[in-house]
Amino acid sequence: MALTVATNVSSLNTQKWLGISSAGQSKALERLSSGYKINKAADDAAGIAIALKLNVKAVSVSKAIDNGNQAIAMLQTAESGVEQIANILTRLKELATQAASDNNKTDLSSLEAERAKLETEINNIAQTTKYGATGVLTGTATLTNTDSLGPSDGVGAIDVTSGKAAVYSVVYDHGTTTFTLTDTTHTTSQSVTVVEPTGLNTAEVNFSNYGIKFTVNSELTGDIAAHAFTVVAGTSSFDFQLGDKNIGSDQITVSIGDFQVSGTGILSAINGGQIDTKAHAQTFLNNVDTAVAALNTQRGTIGAAQNQIGYHVANLNSMYENTLSAESTIKDADYAREMSNFTKSQITMQAGIAMLAQANQVPQQILALLKG
């Protein structure tokens, strides 16, 4: 081997391997400190792309699991209200049976009074059974037969989405600027005073007792004769997103009917029924049976939806676990392997430093030749 002074090839070669050892040690330290074997795209461009997709899916599936658990909680809330209504129907059947017998004819007024109170309580339960601020037993009412009530009368819109099913009549007294809404089905009414709007302004007339709102405009300048309209009970439809895709298999829809005592809801059979006479009580017996059958059908729908969502959530939990496992395989550091690599790099780096010192001493050997 030639001995040269200008270029120390041995030192350069040793420095190269020392740099490789240093880089290996730095890489191992990075992975050990972060917990990931892929910390930037340069480490594994394809791997980091796949890991990101898996992470996004895992996060979305996790939220879908939350949605499913909340959906079950909402349906359980609905079922608890239905259960209490079922208990009231049981009591109504008992009262009707008692009233249908001649030996209780002196108690008919008391029995009828209790029946009316229980009917009111059914409505109260239906209206107050909510998940958060969302009513689950009142359905979404619709408006029919508006009797030409509209913009020419100064009424721009009628909102009945939270309304009680019934036939209504509304009048407006311009002199007192008062709207009066009458529930002709149950012979009750509510009056609301409004400030008549001008120009492009509008005002809201809120009949809070019935869940009905009017929006009035500047055309409201005179009396409005009685106008009739009908509010029909509907169902509340709840859509639950139980997956990470906008597809039907990742979505479940549950419809729950209106449990208020009205002419079109789940309990329409007992609407208007009385037990003030034996004949009425005998008719009411069959009406309660019809209402119970309708309630059981709706209750079965709620229960089936809970089971369906429960199975779906169980599958999501498995999917979440497997997705995280796949991401871990791609991205997570193997500490045993990385510690082994770190130790290897540390030893070779220490050896490299020692050898570099030796390589740097090689040119000193030329002095021996010069002295000779």
Image: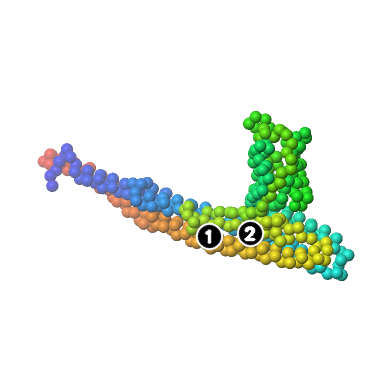
Residue 53 position in % (x across, y down): 41, 51
Q: Is residue 175 rendered to the left or right of residue 338? A: right
Residue 360: tell me if it is visible.
yes
Characterize the local packing of mark 1: few (<14), some (14-19) or many (20 or more) Cα atoms within 10 angstroms.
many
Foreground residue, 284 or 206? 284
Q: Name the residue at 61% across, 62% down.
A: 301
Q: SS class of the residue under badge 1?
A: helix
- Which residue is labeled 1 in the image? 313
Mark 2 highlights which residue?
Answer: 76
- In the displayed structure image, the side of residue 316 where residue 118 appears, left or right: right
| Residue at 38% from the left image edge and 55% from the top image edge | 330
> Which residue, as the protein is rendered here, is positioned at the far right?
106
Residues packed near mark 2 inside 10 Å, few (<14), some (14 to 19) or many (20 plus):
some
| Contact, mark 2 vs mark 1 (Cβ under 8 Å) | no
Q: Position of residue 281 (x, y in %)?
A: 79, 65
* Image: 68 above or below 169: below
